[in-house]
Image: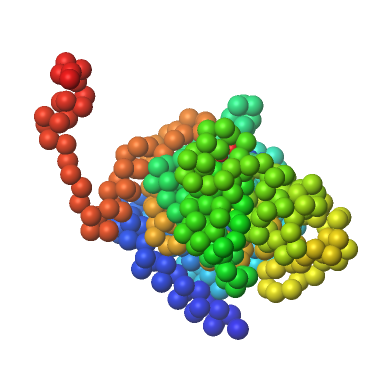
Amino acid sequence: MVDKQLIESGNQKIEWARNHMPVLEIVRNVFEKEMPLEGYTIAMALHVEAKTAVLVDTLVAGGAEVSITGCNPLSTQDDVALALDSKKNIRCYARYGASNEEYYQAIDKVLESNPDITIDDGADLIFKLHTERTDLLSSIKGGCEETTTGIHRLKAMERDKALKMPVIAVNDAMTKFLFDNRYGTGQSAWDGIIRTTNLLVAGKNVVVGGYGWCGKGAAMRAVGLGANVIVTEVDPIRALEARMDGNQVMTMREAAPLGDIFVTTTGNRDILTREHFELMKDGAILANSGHFNIEINLEELEELSSSVRTVRKNIKEYLVDNRRIYVLADGRLVNLAAGDGHPAEVMDMSFSNQALCVRYIAENKLVTGVHPVPEKIDRYVAELKLSSLDITIDELSPLQSEYMHGWESGT
Ligand SMILES: NC(=O)c1ccc[n+]([C@@H]2O[C@H](COP(=O)([O-])OP(=O)(O)OC[C@H]3O[C@@H](n4cnc5c(N)ncnc54)[C@H](O)[C@@H]3O)[C@@H](O)[C@H]2O)c1
Ligand SMILES: N[C@@H](CCSC[C@H]1O[C@@H](n2cnc3c(=O)[nH]cnc32)[C@H](O)[C@@H]1O)C(=O)O
């Protein structure tokens, strides 16, 4: 496709997403009227695809200039990236399949815009600001972080007194993780696996590594698809929760010879390693829907393999003692590297939180540290979402409110 066709295809995807993000549309209309981001430059490193483009568009509607790149070399959709770059007040440096060097060069370029506010998914921009571009820190008003692992990183920096700017932990808003991490990952991880393999899930043994919000979603939807689900955990409470939700719970060593499809969702490293690959069945399929490509130890898998070849788009076959082990999307996020990411309706809430938190940073002077999303914003997003679904809920009567908040009236 030539650039013009790519831009048109990108714009079509953006329009489709926008039409399914009603809360962000309301935020955008308010921004257009009030222009709260006039004069602000925003640097972003997020998955460059259609829903993200709607967020960018919203920030620009509020008066901002935006520089954006990806947060994963395989999640960029080039048509959307080109469409974004063709718009006024937006520069987009993301490219699908960027090498490691190109990926970090793009982060540098985004920071050359001298941003006032950052939006990260995995803290790449903030990490760069605290290492090679400390000169830019004094003019930064604050940042927003999209994902669980990014927040772990930022809290570790805060603990070590290394963090030098305020950051809002957008992931930790209820209207983010309860929906995006759970229902978003639950659906889009399976979308990525199914469209990549074109195989049946019903009747298979699915092993889900980690029973956090993403793991709960992945396990829940696997059950719905007819799989027998096995969960592995390191946290006794979450393991118990997984068992009471009806899954089998065991160690990964025990699960390794049983699994037909493995999905890692821990945000940790080395969930699947040599000792597990050695026990796996012929034809086992491995996918990651957590964070980096280190949940599956691909180096160890490669060392064990007599051959590695691509057998279908986004599927690599590793031959281990004549057993075929298939890795999807090079162990990168299967929902984004082998699919279109989360559904628009959940990103509607995640990105409304982002837009409103960016405004909050612009309008307030926050101190250095990791801040929660203000409860007002979280509830506002939930209320708007309910209203977009045409749902009204009951209200506490004065008597009920008094009963709930008092201590005098016992049983
Ligand atoms: N694919 C996506 O689009 C998407 C969406 C949201 C979050 N994420 C990422 O997914 C990861 C998980 O996010 P979350 O919100 O579910 O986090 P979470 O903290 O709720 O859950 C992670 C779970 O993994 C468990 N775990 C850690 N090490 C383990 C090990 N060695 N074996 C088994 N279990 C282990 C933890 O005990 C925890 O229960 C993060 O990296 C996050 O950034 C991805
Ligand atoms: N930089 C990491 C990021 C982890 S992605 C996890 C985050 O992606 C976000 N996400 C999931 N689907 C989409 C999407 O379609 N568009 C934009 N962001 C998404 C989601 O909010 C979640 O917190 C990496 O790729 O290696």
Relative to 345, does residue 118 appear above or below in the rendering? above
| Residue lying at 39% horizontally and 46% vertically, measured from the top left | 175
Q: Quadrant of the C terminus?
A: top left
| Residue lying at 23% horizontally and 55% vertically, measured from the top left | 391
Is 167 situated left or right of 401 in this image? right
Residue 210 in sight here: no
Q: Quadrant of residue 400?
A: top left
Q: Position of residue 247 (x, y in %)?
A: 53, 47
| Residue lying at 72% horizontally and 65% vertically, measured from the top left | 283
Relative to 24, does residue 144 appear above or below in the rendering? above
Q: Position of residue 48 (x, y in %)?
A: 55, 62
Q: Quadrant of residue 361?
A: top left
Q: In this view of the protein, which residue sits in the foreground, 93 or 334?
A: 334
Residue 24 in sight here: yes
Is 266 situated left or right of 368 in this image? right
Q: Position of residue 406 (x, y in %)?
A: 19, 20
